[in-house]
Amino acid sequence: MAILRPPPARRSMALPPLTSKQRAHLRGLAHSLKPLLHVGKEGVTPEVVRAAVELFHTRELLKVKVLEAAPGAPREEAEALVRELEGTYLVQVTGRTAVLYRPDPDQRTIRLPD
C-alpha cells in the first residue's frame, strides 16, 4: 500500500531585506520608467504573473500599475504579485503604482549600494 504525501511546499529562501539606502537608489532608477504591467479587475492572475516573469527576463526593475478596478488595494495586489514571483522585492508603492526589483542571477545590471 502506497503512502500518499502532499506535494512539497514551495520553498522560498528568505531574501535579505533591502536597506533604506538601497530602496532609495532603486526608487531613483525607477522614477523615469513607465508602467509595463497592469493589474486589472481580476487581480493577480496566472497571466499577470507569467507576464511579469517575461518582463523580468529583460530587466531587473519593473513598474506595475494597479488599476482602480482591481479587487484589492494597490499594496495588497503588489504584495500578492511579489509572493508569486520568487526572488522579487517590493521596493515601493506610490498611489496605484508599485516598483518591483528582481536581481538577475547571471548578469546584474543594477549595482546596489552597501
Image (cartoon, helix red, strand yellow):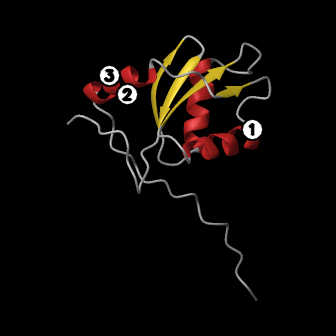
Residue placed under numbered mark 3 in the picture: 24
Residue type (three-letter) at the residue carrying disc 3: Ala
Q: Is residue 95 above or below residue 14?
A: above
**Residue ID at (60%, 23%):** 35
Q: Residues within 10 Å of mark 3 (few under 14, many from 20)?
A: some
Q: Nearer the viewer, residue 75 or 25?
A: 25
Q: Which quarter of the rendering shows the C terminus?
A: top left
Q: Position of residue 78 (x, y in %)?
A: 58, 28
Contact between marks 2 and 3 (CB within 8 A): the answer is yes
**Hey, what amino acid is under mark 1?**
Thr
Q: Residue at x 45, y 18 (%)?
A: 31
Q: Quadrant of residue 83?
A: top right
Identify the amino acid type marked 2.
Leu
Indicate the position of residue 59 as horizontal and vertical percent values.
50, 40
Kindly identify which residue carries mark 2. 26
- Asked if the residue under mark 1 is in contact with the one under mark 3, i.e. CB atoms within 8 Å, the reply is no
Quarter of the image holding residue 71?
Answer: top right
Which circle, 3 or 1, is nearer the viewer?
Answer: 3
Whether residue 73 is situated above or below residue 111 in the rendered picture: above
**Residue 45 — which label?**
1
Q: Callout 2: few (<14), some (14-19), or many (20+) C-alpha neighbours within 10 Å?
A: many
Up/down of 44 relative to 28, above or below: below
Alpha-carbon distance for marks 2 and 1?
26 Å
Q: Quick one: which residue is furthest to the left in this view?
A: 114
C-alpha span from label 2 to label 3: 5 Å
- Could you tell me how far apart the alpha carbons at marks 3 and 1 are, in whole angstroms? 29 Å
